[in-house]
Image (cartoon, coloured by chain):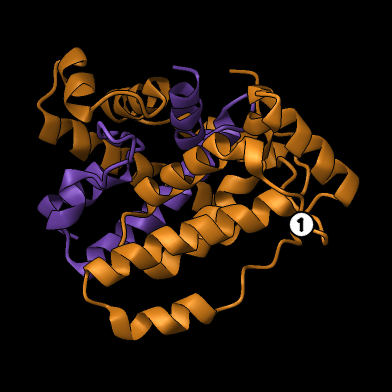
Chain colours: A purple, B orange
Protein backbone atom coordinates (compact mmCIF):
# COMPACT_ATOMS: atom_id res chain seq x y z
CA UNK A 1 0.00 0.00 0.00
CA UNK A 2 1.42 3.41 -0.95
CA UNK A 3 1.99 6.14 1.64
CA UNK A 4 -0.47 8.38 -0.18
CA UNK A 5 -3.19 5.74 -0.13
CA UNK A 6 -2.45 4.98 3.53
CA UNK A 7 -2.88 8.59 4.56
CA UNK A 8 -6.09 9.01 2.55
CA UNK A 9 -7.56 5.96 4.25
CA UNK A 10 -6.29 7.09 7.63
CA UNK A 11 -8.11 10.41 7.29
CA UNK A 12 -11.37 8.43 7.23
CA UNK A 13 -10.54 5.97 10.03
CA UNK A 14 -10.83 8.58 12.81
CA UNK A 15 -14.17 9.10 14.57
CA UNK A 16 -14.43 12.86 14.10
CA UNK A 17 -17.39 13.77 11.89
CA UNK A 18 -18.90 17.18 11.29
CA UNK A 19 -22.49 17.63 12.41
CA UNK A 20 -24.45 19.93 10.10
CA UNK A 21 -26.81 22.67 11.21
CA UNK A 22 -29.68 20.24 10.58
CA UNK A 23 -28.15 17.91 13.16
CA UNK A 24 -27.11 15.23 10.66
CA UNK A 25 -23.69 13.67 10.83
CA UNK A 26 -21.79 14.24 7.61
CA UNK A 27 -19.40 11.80 5.90
CA UNK A 28 -15.71 12.62 6.26
CA UNK A 29 -14.69 14.87 3.34
CA UNK A 30 -11.82 12.50 2.55
CA UNK A 31 -14.25 9.58 2.24
CA UNK A 32 -15.59 10.96 -1.05
CA UNK A 33 -12.06 10.94 -2.51
CA UNK A 34 -11.52 7.23 -1.83
CA UNK A 35 -12.10 4.49 -4.36
CA UNK A 36 -14.84 1.97 -3.43
CA UNK A 37 -12.12 -0.55 -2.49
CA UNK A 38 -10.39 1.96 -0.24
CA UNK A 39 -13.69 2.91 1.42
CA UNK A 40 -14.13 -0.74 2.34
CA UNK A 41 -10.57 -0.87 3.63
CA UNK A 42 -11.12 2.30 5.69
CA UNK A 43 -14.26 0.80 7.25
CA UNK A 44 -12.36 -2.40 8.05
CA UNK A 45 -9.52 -0.47 9.68
CA UNK A 46 -11.97 1.67 11.63
CA UNK A 47 -13.60 -1.51 12.95
CA UNK A 48 -10.24 -2.72 14.24
CA UNK A 49 -9.34 0.72 15.61
CA UNK A 50 -12.62 1.07 17.51
CA UNK A 51 -12.01 -2.34 19.07
CA UNK A 52 -8.55 -1.23 20.21
CA UNK A 53 -9.98 1.99 21.65
CA UNK A 54 -12.77 0.18 23.47
CA UNK A 55 -10.34 -2.34 24.95
CA UNK A 56 -8.16 0.50 26.26
CA UNK A 57 -11.08 2.48 27.70
CA UNK A 58 -12.20 1.84 31.30
CA UNK A 59 -15.84 1.97 30.21
CA UNK A 60 -15.25 -0.07 27.01
CA UNK A 61 -16.26 2.93 24.95
CA UNK A 62 -14.66 3.66 21.61
CA UNK A 63 -14.02 7.19 20.37
CA UNK A 64 -17.23 6.81 18.33
CA UNK A 65 -19.23 6.14 21.49
CA UNK A 66 -17.58 9.06 23.27
CA UNK A 67 -18.34 11.35 20.33
CA UNK A 68 -22.02 10.35 20.40
CA UNK A 69 -22.27 10.81 24.16
CA UNK A 70 -20.64 14.23 23.94
CA UNK A 71 -23.27 15.27 21.39
CA UNK A 72 -26.25 14.19 23.47
CA UNK A 73 -24.88 16.05 26.48
CA UNK A 74 -24.45 19.36 24.71
CA UNK B 1 -14.21 7.77 31.20
CA UNK B 2 -15.61 5.10 33.45
CA UNK B 3 -19.04 4.77 31.97
CA UNK B 4 -19.96 2.13 29.46
CA UNK B 5 -20.83 -1.50 29.10
CA UNK B 6 -20.02 -4.47 31.20
CA UNK B 7 -20.05 -7.18 28.63
CA UNK B 8 -23.76 -7.78 28.69
CA UNK B 9 -25.02 -9.33 25.51
CA UNK B 10 -27.13 -6.72 23.70
CA UNK B 11 -29.77 -9.42 23.21
CA UNK B 12 -31.14 -8.70 26.66
CA UNK B 13 -34.17 -10.44 28.14
CA UNK B 14 -37.54 -8.73 27.82
CA UNK B 15 -37.32 -7.49 31.42
CA UNK B 16 -33.86 -6.04 30.87
CA UNK B 17 -35.04 -4.64 27.57
CA UNK B 18 -37.94 -2.83 29.24
CA UNK B 19 -35.70 -1.63 32.05
CA UNK B 20 -33.19 -0.17 29.65
CA UNK B 21 -35.88 1.47 27.54
CA UNK B 22 -37.40 3.05 30.63
CA UNK B 23 -34.02 4.32 31.83
CA UNK B 24 -33.23 5.84 28.46
CA UNK B 25 -36.70 7.35 28.14
CA UNK B 26 -36.02 9.04 31.48
CA UNK B 27 -32.83 10.53 30.02
CA UNK B 28 -30.35 8.16 31.66
CA UNK B 29 -27.20 8.72 29.59
CA UNK B 30 -25.36 6.06 31.59
CA UNK B 31 -27.84 3.41 30.45
CA UNK B 32 -27.35 4.62 26.89
CA UNK B 33 -23.54 4.52 27.27
CA UNK B 34 -23.72 0.94 28.51
CA UNK B 35 -25.83 -0.06 25.53
CA UNK B 36 -23.53 1.81 23.12
CA UNK B 37 -20.52 -0.12 24.36
CA UNK B 38 -22.27 -3.43 23.76
CA UNK B 39 -23.98 -2.50 20.53
CA UNK B 40 -21.40 -0.58 18.52
CA UNK B 41 -19.34 -3.54 17.21
CA UNK B 42 -22.47 -5.35 16.03
CA UNK B 43 -23.95 -2.28 14.35
CA UNK B 44 -20.65 -1.46 12.66
CA UNK B 45 -20.26 -5.04 11.43
CA UNK B 46 -23.80 -5.01 10.05
CA UNK B 47 -22.96 -1.96 7.96
CA UNK B 48 -19.77 -3.31 6.40
CA UNK B 49 -21.62 -4.51 3.26
CA UNK B 50 -22.45 -0.84 2.59
CA UNK B 51 -18.91 0.45 3.12
CA UNK B 52 -18.30 1.21 -0.56
CA UNK B 53 -21.37 3.46 -0.78
CA UNK B 54 -21.73 4.92 2.72
CA UNK B 55 -19.32 6.31 5.28
CA UNK B 56 -19.93 3.68 7.97
CA UNK B 57 -18.59 5.90 10.75
CA UNK B 58 -21.09 8.66 9.93
CA UNK B 59 -23.95 6.15 9.68
CA UNK B 60 -23.07 4.56 13.04
CA UNK B 61 -23.03 7.93 14.81
CA UNK B 62 -26.22 9.12 13.12
CA UNK B 63 -27.97 5.86 14.05
CA UNK B 64 -27.08 6.17 17.72
CA UNK B 65 -28.14 9.80 17.82
CA UNK B 66 -31.50 8.92 16.28
CA UNK B 67 -32.06 6.15 18.81
CA UNK B 68 -31.32 8.59 21.63
CA UNK B 69 -33.47 11.41 20.27
CA UNK B 70 -36.36 9.03 19.61
CA UNK B 71 -36.06 7.25 22.96
CA UNK B 72 -39.28 8.65 24.41
CA UNK B 73 -41.40 7.15 21.66
CA UNK B 74 -39.90 3.66 21.41
CA UNK B 75 -42.42 0.87 21.92
CA UNK B 76 -41.01 -2.38 23.33
CA UNK B 77 -40.87 -5.13 20.73
CA UNK B 78 -42.88 -8.21 21.82
CA UNK B 79 -39.85 -10.42 21.29
CA UNK B 80 -37.46 -8.12 23.16
CA UNK B 81 -34.16 -6.72 21.90
CA UNK B 82 -36.04 -3.57 20.98
CA UNK B 83 -33.10 -1.19 20.84
CA UNK B 84 -30.96 -3.62 18.84
CA UNK B 85 -33.70 -4.15 16.26
CA UNK B 86 -34.22 -0.42 16.06
CA UNK B 87 -30.52 0.37 15.63
CA UNK B 88 -30.05 -2.25 12.91
CA UNK B 89 -33.13 -0.99 11.11
CA UNK B 90 -32.17 2.69 11.29
CA UNK B 91 -28.57 1.98 10.31
CA UNK B 92 -29.60 -0.10 7.34
CA UNK B 93 -32.14 2.49 6.22
CA UNK B 94 -29.56 5.27 6.39
CA UNK B 95 -27.04 3.17 4.45
CA UNK B 96 -29.63 2.29 1.82
CA UNK B 97 -30.44 5.99 1.40
CA UNK B 98 -26.74 6.54 0.70
CA UNK B 99 -26.71 3.61 -1.73
CA UNK B 100 -29.64 5.13 -3.62
CA UNK B 101 -27.84 8.45 -3.80
CA UNK B 102 -24.83 6.59 -5.19
CA UNK B 103 -27.00 5.05 -7.93
CA UNK B 104 -26.85 1.51 -6.52
CA UNK B 105 -30.60 0.94 -6.85
CA UNK B 106 -29.96 -2.56 -8.19
CA UNK B 107 -28.33 -3.64 -4.91
CA UNK B 108 -30.83 -1.92 -2.65
CA UNK B 109 -33.57 -4.55 -2.85
CA UNK B 110 -31.22 -7.33 -1.78
CA UNK B 111 -29.82 -5.26 1.07
CA UNK B 112 -33.30 -4.22 2.23
CA UNK B 113 -34.49 -7.83 2.32
CA UNK B 114 -31.43 -9.31 4.02
CA UNK B 115 -32.00 -10.68 7.51
CA UNK B 116 -31.03 -8.57 10.48
CA UNK B 117 -27.76 -9.75 12.03
CA UNK B 118 -27.81 -12.40 14.73
CA UNK B 119 -27.81 -10.93 18.21
CA UNK B 120 -26.43 -13.92 20.08
CA UNK B 121 -22.80 -13.15 20.79
CA UNK B 122 -20.37 -12.70 23.61
CA UNK B 123 -19.50 -9.08 24.30
CA UNK B 124 -17.55 -9.73 27.49
CA UNK B 125 -14.31 -7.79 27.83
CA UNK B 126 -11.20 -9.87 27.24
CA UNK B 127 -8.60 -9.01 29.91
CA UNK B 128 -5.84 -10.82 28.00
CA UNK B 129 -6.54 -8.92 24.82
CA UNK B 130 -6.54 -5.65 26.69
CA UNK B 131 -3.21 -6.49 28.36
CA UNK B 132 -1.61 -7.37 25.04
CA UNK B 133 -2.88 -4.21 23.39
CA UNK B 134 -1.43 -2.20 26.27
CA UNK B 135 1.85 -4.07 25.94
CA UNK B 136 2.10 -3.53 22.18
CA UNK B 137 1.06 0.11 22.44
CA UNK B 138 3.81 0.75 24.99
CA UNK B 139 6.35 -0.50 22.47
CA UNK B 140 5.36 1.95 19.75
CA UNK B 141 7.92 4.56 18.70
CA UNK B 142 7.34 8.00 20.19
CA UNK B 143 5.62 9.77 17.29
CA UNK B 144 3.23 6.98 16.25
CA UNK B 145 2.36 6.54 19.94
CA UNK B 146 1.69 10.26 20.34
CA UNK B 147 -0.50 10.40 17.23
CA UNK B 148 -2.55 7.37 18.32
CA UNK B 149 -2.97 8.72 21.84
CA UNK B 150 -4.00 12.15 20.56
CA UNK B 151 -6.87 10.62 18.60
CA UNK B 152 -7.97 8.54 21.58
CA UNK B 153 -7.83 11.56 23.91
CA UNK B 154 -9.78 13.67 21.42
CA UNK B 155 -12.61 11.11 21.65
CA UNK B 156 -13.90 11.89 18.19
CA UNK B 157 -14.52 15.53 19.05
CA UNK B 158 -11.62 17.24 17.27
CA UNK B 159 -10.26 17.41 13.74
CA UNK B 160 -6.96 15.74 12.86
CA UNK B 161 -5.63 19.13 11.73
CA UNK B 162 -5.90 20.48 15.29
CA UNK B 163 -4.38 17.37 16.85
CA UNK B 164 -1.48 17.44 14.40
CA UNK B 165 -0.79 21.11 15.14
CA UNK B 166 -0.65 20.42 18.88
CA UNK B 167 1.93 17.71 18.26
CA UNK B 168 3.94 20.01 15.97
CA UNK B 169 3.24 17.84 12.93
CA UNK B 170 1.85 18.52 9.49
CA UNK B 171 -1.54 16.81 9.07
CA UNK B 172 -0.09 14.44 6.50
CA UNK B 173 2.72 13.45 8.86
CA UNK B 174 0.19 12.93 11.64
CA UNK B 175 -1.83 10.59 9.41
CA UNK B 176 1.32 8.69 8.40
CA UNK B 177 2.20 8.24 12.08
CA UNK B 178 -1.30 6.92 12.81
CA UNK B 179 -1.08 4.48 9.95
CA UNK B 180 2.32 3.33 11.14
CA UNK B 181 1.07 2.99 14.71
CA UNK B 182 -1.76 0.68 13.69
CA UNK B 183 0.50 -1.45 11.48
CA UNK B 184 3.06 -1.85 14.27
CA UNK B 185 0.37 -2.58 16.83
CA UNK B 186 -1.23 -5.17 14.56
CA UNK B 187 2.13 -6.81 13.83
CA UNK B 188 3.02 -6.90 17.53
CA UNK B 189 -0.31 -8.54 18.38
CA UNK B 190 0.06 -11.04 15.56
CA UNK B 191 3.41 -12.09 17.00
CA UNK B 192 1.54 -13.34 20.07
CA UNK B 193 -1.17 -14.95 17.98
CA UNK B 194 -3.82 -12.22 18.17
CA UNK B 195 -5.43 -11.22 14.89
CA UNK B 196 -7.78 -8.38 15.77
CA UNK B 197 -10.00 -8.81 12.75
CA UNK B 198 -10.65 -12.38 13.91
CA UNK B 199 -11.59 -11.53 17.49
CA UNK B 200 -14.34 -9.05 16.75
CA UNK B 201 -17.51 -9.76 18.71
Residue sitting at 23 percent across and 51 percent down? A9
Which of A23/B127 is in front?
Answer: A23
Q: Is residue B200 visible?
A: no
Q: What percent of the width, then of the height, locates residue B32?
A: 64, 32
Q: Is residue B11 left or right of residue B58?
A: right
State the image coordinates of residue B89 (x, y, percent, origin top left): 55, 61
Q: Is residue B74 above or below residue B130?
A: below
Residue at 76% x, 62% y is B120
Q: Is residue B200 left or right of residue B50?
A: right
Q: Residue at x 29, y 30 (%)?
A: B144
Describe residue A21's horizontal placement relative to residue B36 as left or right.
Answer: left
Tell me the SS state at disc 1.
loop
Considering depth in this image, is A14 or B146 the residue closer to the camera? A14
Which quarter of the image is occupied by the C terminus of chain A? top left
Whether residue B113 is situated above or below residue B8 in the rendered picture: below
Pick the residue in front: B191 or B78.
B78
Q: Residue furthest right?
A: B15
Residue B109 found in image quarter: bottom left
Q: Nearer the viewer, residue A16 or B153?
A: A16
Label 1 environment density (alpha carbons within 10 Å; few <14, some 14–19, many ≥20): some
- Picture coordinates of residue A69, whole percent (x, y): 51, 26
Q: Quadrant of residue B6?
A: top right
Residue tagged by mark 1? Answer: B77
Q: In the rendered image of this protein, does residue B174 appear above or below residue A33?
A: above
Question: Please, which chain is the residue tagged with disc 1 on?
Answer: B
Amino acid sequence: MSHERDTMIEAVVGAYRYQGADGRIRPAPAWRDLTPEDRVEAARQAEVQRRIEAELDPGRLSTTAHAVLARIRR
Amino acid sequence: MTEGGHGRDPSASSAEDAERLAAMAAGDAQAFASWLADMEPALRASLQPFAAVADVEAVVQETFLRVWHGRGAIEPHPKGRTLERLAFTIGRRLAIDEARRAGRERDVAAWAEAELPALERDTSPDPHLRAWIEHCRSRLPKKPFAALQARIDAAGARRDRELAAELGMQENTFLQNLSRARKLLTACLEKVGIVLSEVMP
